[in-house]
Amino acid sequence: MSGVMGVYAPVAARPLVATGSRPSARRTLQLALALIWLLDGVLQLQGFFFTKAFGSQMITMTAAGNPWFIARPISLSGAMIAQHAVLADSAFALLQIAIGLGMAWRPTLKAALAASIAWSLGVWWIGEGFGGIFNGTANPVNGAPGAVILYALLAVLLWPRDVAVPDCTFAASMTIGTRGARALWSLLWGSLAYFAVAGANSSAQGLHDLITSMASGEPAWLASLDRDVAGLVAHQGTILTTSIAILLAIVACGVYLPRRPGNITIGFAVVLALLFWVIGQNFGALFTNSATDVNSGPLLILLAAAFWRPVRRRPDVPDAVSPQPRGSLS
């Protein structure tokens, strides 16, 4: 987490492309994403994932409430993983570590990003049940629409190009342009605003029940924090989730504002992501010995860093990114 925040803070002071030996902001973001992939691979090596419970319980439970054509492949995959738990989990861990290492080494960057997109889409279905968007349980506070789909989104936005698009003004726009990047940002954060108040999420006790459920399996100090926060939001769910949805909607639209107010909304995005990660996601459940990833909080912060618009007309920050004669723009 500290590494991700370290990426976010200095983005505005870094050029979009490399100058001399200094890596570009975009390359720094790629390396941060690589580190998160490596961490996920290490987390996958925890003892729980080498047991049948990984497939028969953790995987299979994501099928609940989903349409049969989504649930059936999840159930079959969960049963297969349970039968070959050691082999399957070893392969999962090694693949994620390989993706992280591939992103860190420039010659294999594109191959690793492509592999991460394919793997993310598969895990989004089989491992996360599409983040609960089809069974009415999606809630951005605890990670909807699923952390793994954010890996795929980041891979698309940070994909290296041999020639930069002409209208790029921030790191995420260098692949598909400012208009395309802004559209993806608005789609993501707009959907988060919708999920925040969808179904039972907007009920008076919805937020209380969600936070209370997070206490199971956590260390005593974190479980106590969950119970204290749940007590504070008891019977306040409707007004709080409505407020969260409004803030998320503002963030969704903020990328279309001029640089200064737009960056302020990016700051809102970081604050919301941190709140979600601490309160609704318990630091990605990293203390439970059963976390497969860091959850959505750090990924949303990394995404926000990619949309930060640096101050222009500085000596080390070009107003426009021109094609480089050799190699690719990273």
Image: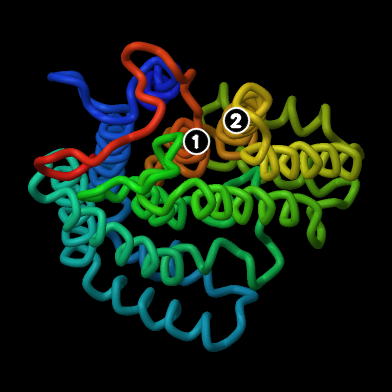
Under circle 1, the secondary element is helix
- Amino acid under label 2? Ile
Q: Is residue 280 left or right of residue 27?
A: right
Which image quarter holds the C terminus? top left
Q: Can you identify the residue that label 2 sits on?
A: 266
Q: Is residue 180 left or right of residue 165?
A: right
Give the number of the disc on residue 307.
1
In the image, 57 versus 281, the foreground residue is 281
Q: Is residue 268 left or right of residue 55?
A: right
- Measured as percent of width and height from the top left, residue 69 is found at 53, 88
Q: Quadrant of residue 117?
A: bottom left
- Measured as percent of width and height from the top left, residue 48 is found at 32, 51
Tell me what residue is drawn at x 44 percent, y 16 percent.
313
- Measured as percent of width and height from the top left, residue 3 is found at 35, 23
Tell me what residue is drawn at x 30 percent, y 45 percent.
164
Under circle 2, the secondary element is helix
Please say if 61 is above or below 322. Answer: below
- Measured as percent of width and height from the top left, residue 145 is found at 58, 57
Please say if 298 is above or below 222. Answer: below
In the image, 64 versus 319, the foreground residue is 319
Please say if 283 is above or below 212. Answer: above
First reached walking from the N terminus: tag 2 or tag 1? 2
Q: Quadrant of residue 249?
A: top right
In contact (CB < 8 Å): disc 2 and disc 1: yes
Which image quarter holds the N terminus? top left
- Amino acid under label 1? Phe
Q: Is residue 223 visible?
A: no
Crowd class of label 1 (few under 14; some 14 to 19; many from 20; radius 10 Å): many
